[in-house]
Amino acid sequence: MKTLEERFNEKWLPVTESGCWLWVGTVSGSNSYGYISSGGKNKRAHRISYELFNGEIDDGLSVMHKCDCPSCVNPDHLVLGTHQDNMSDSASKGRKGLKLTPEQVVEIRADDRSGRKLAKQYNVSRRTIDRIKSNQIWKEL
C-alpha cells in the first residue's frame, strides 16, 4: 500500500515557467483546489503538501498561495496565515473585496440583534453573521 506522500507525488506536474506544481488529481470544479484522501477524508491537496513538506498546521490557520494559483501544491509557494491574512491578501490583489473589517466583526459579536437585521446592516448573508457569532470564521478576533 502506498504512503500518502507517494500518492501525493503521483498527482502533480511541474510548470517550469512559474515553478508551480499543478495538481492533476481530483479537483473541485467550483474553486480549482485539488483534493486527496487522507485518513478516510478528502482534504485539500495544498494543505497536505504543506504538512508533508513544511510541518503541522496549527488550528485556525489557512494555507495561502504566494503564486495565487489554487491548483498549485508546491510547498515553496505555500505560507501559513490567519483567515484575515488570506482575505486581506486576496483583496490586495483584486481577487475579492473584503466585506467586513475586524472592527465590524467585533461589533457584530457584541450586538444582540437578530442575524437577519445584522446581515442587512452589514450587507452580508445571515449565514455569515451566524458563523461570526459562533467563531467559525474570524476566530483570531
Image (cartoon, rainbow, N blue to C red):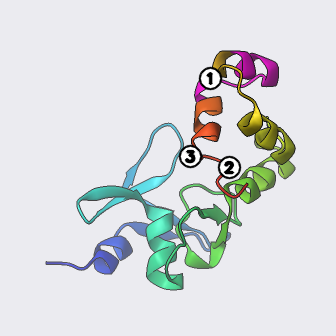
Instruction: Give the residue type at disc 1.
Output: Arg
Indicate the amino acid at tag 3.
Gln
Viewer-proximal residue, 109 or 52?
A: 109
Do the numbered discs 3 and 1 sit on residues whose CB atoms are within 8 Å? no
| Residue 138's disc number | 2
Say which label, 3 or 1, has the lower sequence index. Answer: 1
Magenta run includes residue 124: yes
Stretch in magenta = 117-127
Amino acid found under the numbered disc labelled 2: Trp
Q: Is residue 66 left or right of residue 121?
A: left
Mark linked to residue 126: 1
Work out whether 87 lies above or below 96: below
Q: Main secondary structure of the magenta part?
A: helix
**Quarter of the figure with residue 128:** top right
Residue drawn at x 56%, y 77% is 75
Q: Is residue 45 visible?
A: yes
Left or right: 41, with 104 as reference point: left
Q: Residues within 10 Å of mark 2 (few under 14, many from 20)?
A: some
Residue that mark 3 sits on:
136
* Label 3 CA crowd tier, 10 Å (few <14, some 14–19, many 20+): few
Disc 3 element: loop
Tell me the CA gap for discs 3 and 1.
14 Å
> For numbered disc 1, what is the local secondary structure?
helix
Q: Is residue 40 left or right of residue 29?
A: left
Q: CA distance from mark 2 to mark 3?
A: 7 Å
Furthest residue to the left? 1
Above or below residue 36? Residue 108 is above
The answer to which of 58 and 42 lies nearer the viewer is 58
